[in-house]
Amino acid sequence: MYGTVTRISPEAPVPVMVYDRVETAKGMAYNVRENLMSFGSEVYMMTHESSITKTRYVDSKSNQQIMRLDENDTAEDFGWELPEEQFDVMVISDYNKGFLSEEKIQELVDWFKGPVFIDSKKTRLPKECYIKVNDREAQKLEGDYPNLIVTRGSQGCTYDGMSFPGINVPVFDVAGAGDTFLATLVHFYLLLGTIDRAIPYANKAAAIAVTHFGTYVLSQDDVNEIRC
């Protein structure tokens, strides 16, 4: 929700925003899917039947986010069944909203016979998987994880004792940048065979995402730039 802030309310010390326009985009796990599809990947999606909605109120002049309103912020497990199809990789995007329990994540990992990538806000995860978290989430993890990928914003990321520098760009919005990183990481891991070779491409993708407002899906021009 974009608008123009012209004054402070006489009723309380809060800005008054005059409505301008609304822009919508699929976020969370859908953002991972959309960005994977930007690279030409075929994606089978499993998620909750209800939708979590995040509405950000943004001042058009400054692009400053004034408030975020979350609706249907939790989603209980509704008893879904595992698919019969065969896949090259499984990606678990878990925002800890109640849909995926630790037990359900372990069930998925045990079921799938291939590489598994997990991006989660939980503190205990299957250690045999590739775990992608940000710096704050990494500090809350319980135990040691041999395949831990930690993103650090403009500072890039770390993996297996190695540091991968970030790319300095003007940052307009970090919403969804981690999802873009994850999708690109998975694509180039399948293409190149190792995490350390895939990470620089994921850093480039995340740098592109933060230069756009809102949840951003990579364009074909972006994909061509990342591949260079």
Image: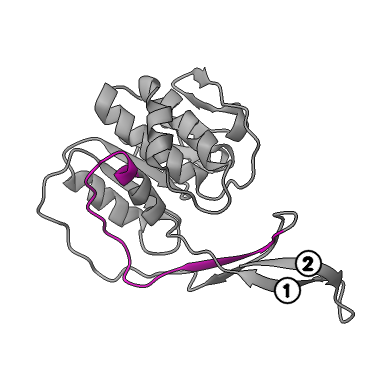
Q: Give the range drawn in magenta.
A: 36-60
Q: In the picture provided, is 127 more to the left or to the right than 210?
A: left
Q: Residue 18 carries which label?
A: 1
Residue at 61% x, 27% y: name it: 155
Residue type at mark 2: give it: Val
Q: Can residue 125 be seen in this view?
A: no
Q: Residue 5 carries which label?
A: 2
Q: Describe the element under mark 2 as helix, strand or loop.
A: strand
Q: Where is the N terminus found, in terms of image quarters?
A: bottom right
Q: Is residue 182 visible?
A: yes
Residue at 31% x, 55% y: name it: 103
Residue type at mark 1: give it: Val
Contact (Cβ within 8 Å) of mark 1 with mark 2: yes
Q: Where is the C terminus found, in terms of image quarters?
A: top left
Q: Where is residue 124 in the image (x, y as percent from the top left)?
A: 42, 46
Q: Residue 16's quadrant in the figure?
A: bottom right
What secondary structure predominates along the stretch shown in magenta?
loop
44 falls in the magenta region: yes
Residue at 41% x, 42% y: name it: 219
Q: Is residue 80 above or below residue 169?
A: below
Q: Position of residue 222 (x, y in %)?
A: 43, 36
Task: Give the distance between the C-alpha atoms of the residues marked 1 and 2, in whole angstroms.
Answer: 6 Å
Nearer to the camera, 216 or 130: 216
Nearer to the camera, 20 or 193: 20
Q: In the picture provided, is 143 more to the left or to the right than 11?
A: left
